[in-house]
Amino acid sequence: MTDINVFLDAVGLDCPLPLLKAKQALNRMACGEVLEVLATDVGSVKDFEVFAKQSGHALLLREDNAGTYRYLFKKK
């Protein structure tokens, strides 16, 4: 089990807010810390995948639970 350092509830927010709020949260975190994000925006699936590749932050987990998406990012 991965320890979560910061939790972000982006449920109900539309694109691009989940991604923007995740970026802001990661900017405030220390290297190696883990951010958990919950979102309902279907666009977040692609947005977070591309963001992880471009930013270098590790996308540790992406899961879909009936339209609520859960992500774990490890800050580089």
Image (cartoon, rainbow, N blue to C red):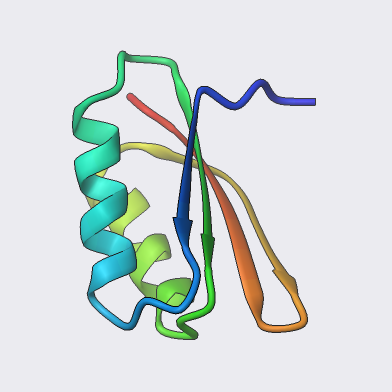
Q: Nearer the viewer, residue 11 or 19?
A: 11
User: In which quadrant is the N terminus drawn?
Assistant: top right
Residue at position x 40%, y 83% in the image: 43
Q: Nearer the viewer, residue 59 or 7?
A: 7
Q: Position of residue 13 (x, y in %)?
A: 37, 76
In the displayed structure, 24 sits above or below 68; it is above
Q: Quadrant of residue 51?
A: bottom left
Residue 41 image position (x, y, % from top left): 45, 82
Establish if 50 lies above or below 35.
Answer: below
> Which percent across, then down, holds residue 4?
60, 27
Total marks placed: 0
**Residue at left offset 25%, top offset 70%:** 17
Q: Residue at x 50, y 70 (%)?
A: 11
Q: Quadrant of the C terminus?
A: top left
Residue 71 at x, y = what percent? 56, 53
Image position of 27 with respect to 23: above or below: above
Q: Quadrant of residue 24?
A: top left
